[in-house]
């Protein structure tokens, strides 16, 4: 089901049997759409979670390839905050890639944060252009709509790694901000935070994610054999289970929805 919370477009998957007091708000990454969360949303619904997948600015409808949306990082932060405020209860924030970075920045307004393969902003004064080039090269290998699809044995792997829903053009303004005015995270997270790293991720290498975890005090989990597309690449079922168990362990009884006495009879 899709609905709008003001400006942002939200896709919702209701829990089959509501068990938890917090919904999960899902944030997609660069060049992707909210469709990347379809596998996770179905599984979460079965586990008792209601989840909402936010479509970031400029990613909701077909866009003329010649016109790149000019939404910036601040615009995306504002959209996330708007969606948080409109949720039925304070949500768990879960993001991938750019969405993971947004989730970590908005953690003070959430019950917990799960960041899958977060983009790692370059240190101030470093070779920032090189970092942007690495992001583009790593993502374009599998996701770029401008490259021809491979044939033969590579076609199966390509299909598995390409995001559900296809790709969208990305904001030139946002890419410039990420490369040259990086949004660094400072201090310990305000809520329980889990960083998930793909063991074979060339865009957000696990060593850098572990360094970020050490700097911020977040927990970290390495997904063996996984690349950058953690929400949909093969093995995503195990990652959903890992995230689910971590959330239940961290939030404890406060997460459980009271059972009405009439329902028990």
Image (tube, rainbow, N blue to C red):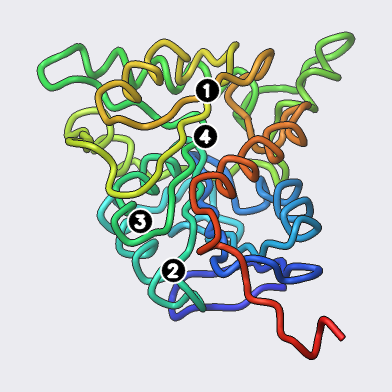
The C terminus is located in which quarter? bottom right
Q: Residues within 10 Å of mark 4 (few under 14, many from 20)?
A: many
Viewer-proximal residue among 139 and 228: 228
Coordinates of residue 164 in the picture (x, y in percent):
72, 43
Q: Which residue is mark 4?
A: 116
Coordinates of residue 47 in the picture (x, y in percent):
76, 55
Viewer-proximal residue among 104 and 56: 104
Which residue reaches farthest bottom?
262
Q: Which residue is mark 2?
A: 90
In this rendering, which labeled residue sits more in front, label 2 or label 1? 2
The residue that appears at 77% across and 51% down in the rendered structure is 43
The residue that appears at 63% across and 76% down in the rendered structure is 258
Viewer-proximal residue among 238 and 70: 238
Residue 256 position by quadrant: bottom right
Of mark 4 and mark 1, the one earlier in the sequence is 4
Residue 63 position by quadrant: bottom right
In this rendering, which labeled residue sits more in front, label 4 or label 2? 2
In this rendering, which labeled residue sits more in front, label 3 or label 1? 1
**Circles 4 and 1: CB distance less than 8 Å?**
no
Q: Residues within 10 Å of mark 2 (few under 14, many from 20)?
A: some
Of mark 3 and mark 4, the one earlier in the sequence is 3
Q: Which residue is mark 3?
A: 76
Disc 2/disc 3 C-alpha distance (Å)? 19 Å
Left or right of 19: which side holds 253?
Answer: left
Q: Residues within 10 Å of mark 1 (few under 14, many from 20)?
A: many
């Amino acid at each position: 089901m899709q609905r709008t919370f003001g400006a942002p477009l939200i896709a919702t998957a209701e829990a089959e049997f509501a068990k938890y007091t917090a919904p999960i708000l899902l944030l997609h990454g660069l060049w992707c759409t909210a469709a990347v969360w379809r596998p996770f949303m179905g599984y979460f619904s079965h586990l008792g979670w209601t989840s909402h997948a936010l479509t970031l600015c400029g990613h909701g409808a077909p866009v003329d390839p010649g016109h790149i949306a000019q939404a910036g990082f601040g615009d995306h932060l504002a959209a996330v905050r708007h969606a948080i405020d409109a949720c039925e209860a304070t949500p768990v924030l879960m993001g991938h890639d750019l969405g993971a970075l947004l989730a970590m920045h908005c953690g003070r307004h959430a019950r917990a944060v799960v960041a899958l393969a977060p983009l790692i902003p370059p240190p101030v004064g470093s070779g920032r252009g090189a970092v942007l080039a690495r992001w583009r090269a790593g993502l374009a290998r599998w996701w770029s709509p401008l490259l021809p699809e491979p044939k033969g044995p590579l076609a199966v792997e390509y299909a598995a790694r390409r995001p559900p829903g296809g790709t969208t053009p990305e904001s030139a303004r946002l890419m410039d901000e990420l490369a040259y005015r990086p949004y660094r995270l400072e201090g310990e997270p305000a809520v329980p935070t889990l960083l998930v790293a793909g063991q074979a991720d060339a865009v957000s290498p696990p060593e850098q994610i572990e360094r970020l975890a050490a700097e911020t005090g977040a927990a970290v989990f390495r997904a063996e054999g996984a690349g950058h597309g953690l929400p949909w690449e093969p093995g995503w079922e195990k990652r959903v289970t890992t995230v689910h168990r971590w959330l239940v362990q961290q939030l404890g009884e406060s997460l459980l929805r009271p059972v009405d006495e009439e329902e028990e009879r």
